[in-house]
Every structure is written in structure tokens, then in C-alpha cells.
Image: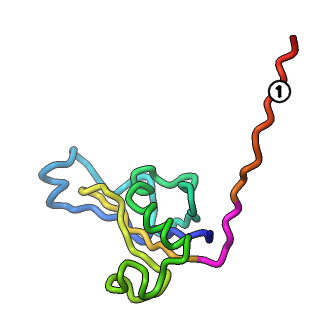
Amino acid sequence: MKKVKITVLKTTLDQDLAREYGVEGLGPCPMLQAGQVFYGDYAKPQGLCDEAWKAMYQYVFALAHGAEGDLFYYGDWIRTPGVAICSCNDGLRPVIFKLEATDQETVIDDTPVQRKENPQ
């Protein structure tokens, strides 16, 4: 399994929907900034919004396992192999992400936790 580079391309705000449904003073997502980079694989990267991860994890998983080119989502979506563009699920202020397959191998830390024996 490979790591996937997750780049924040932009934060947005749908002015019309925000005016109709949002709270006063609502702006673009305050948690993420354009240019931020994370690396994901089987687990959510530290610092990435939980809701954004829920919206993208299936793409990250596919890219981490080698789905790209003509096989990645039927070859009718993104022209660059190993890349996906997606957004979080905030309908008023979505954040747009670029996901890229990398050659970096994932290291799974499966070292068991040692319990201390209960001295009695």
C-alpha cells in the first residue's frame, strides 16, 4: 500500500446558499487553508477534518492500492493517472482537495501494546 498526498486546493463559500441558510458572518472553512498537505493511507491523517476524511477516504483507499489511469473510476473523470479531485461534504463552504498517488510505502505499526502484569 502506498501513501496518498492530499493537498487543499481551495476553500470556498457559496454566497447564495450561505445568505439563505448560513449563520450571520459565515465564511470559508476555518479549519483548512489552501496549500496544506497531508498524507493518508488506511487511516485519517492527523489534523485533517473528520468530515473531509469521510468524503474522500474511498478515493484515498483506491489510490493507495494502485487504482489509476483508465481503471480509476472508469477513466472518464480525471485525465491525469493517479489523481482525484474531491471536496468535503459541507454544502455551504466546501473545501476542494487534490489526491495524488505516491511511491511512498505505508508502514503499518502493528506492534502489540504490552500490558503490565498486575502485582498482587
In the rendered view, tell whether residue 32 sits above or below residue 78. Answer: above
Q: Residue furthest right?
A: 119
Q: Which residue lies furthest to the left in this view?
A: 20
Give the quarter of the image for residue 71.
Answer: bottom left
In the rendered view, does 21 fall on the left or right side of 60?
Answer: left
Q: Residue at x 83, y 26 (%)?
A: 116
x then y, percent, for residue 36: 52, 65
- Mark 1 closeness class: few <14, some 14–19, many ≥20 residues within 10 Å: few
Quadrant occupied by the C terminus: top right
x then y, percent, for residue 102: 60, 77
Find numbered disc 1 in the image and state the secondary structure of the residue it sits on. Answer: loop
Quick one: 21 or 86, which is closer to the camera? 86
Quadrant occupied by the N terminus: bottom right
Give the quarter of the image for residue 42.
Answer: bottom right
In the rendered view, does 72 fall on the left or right side of 25?
Answer: right
In the rendered view, does 118 fall on the left or right side of 21?
Answer: right
Q: Is residue 14 magenta?
A: no
In the rendered view, does 13 fall on the left or right side of 65?
Answer: left
In the rendered view, tell whether residue 76 sits above or below residue 50. Answer: below
Magenta region: which residues?
102-107
Q: Is residue 104 magenta?
A: yes
Q: Mark 1 points at which residue?
A: 116
Q: Which residue is drawn at 42% across and 88% down?
A: 70
Q: Residue at x 71, y 62 (%)?
A: 107
Quick one: 118 or 88, which is closer to the camera? 118
What's the coloring here?
rainbow
x then y, percent, for residue 94: 31, 61
In the rendered view, tell whether residue 57 sits above or below residue 82. Answer: above
x then y, percent, for residue 79: 39, 89
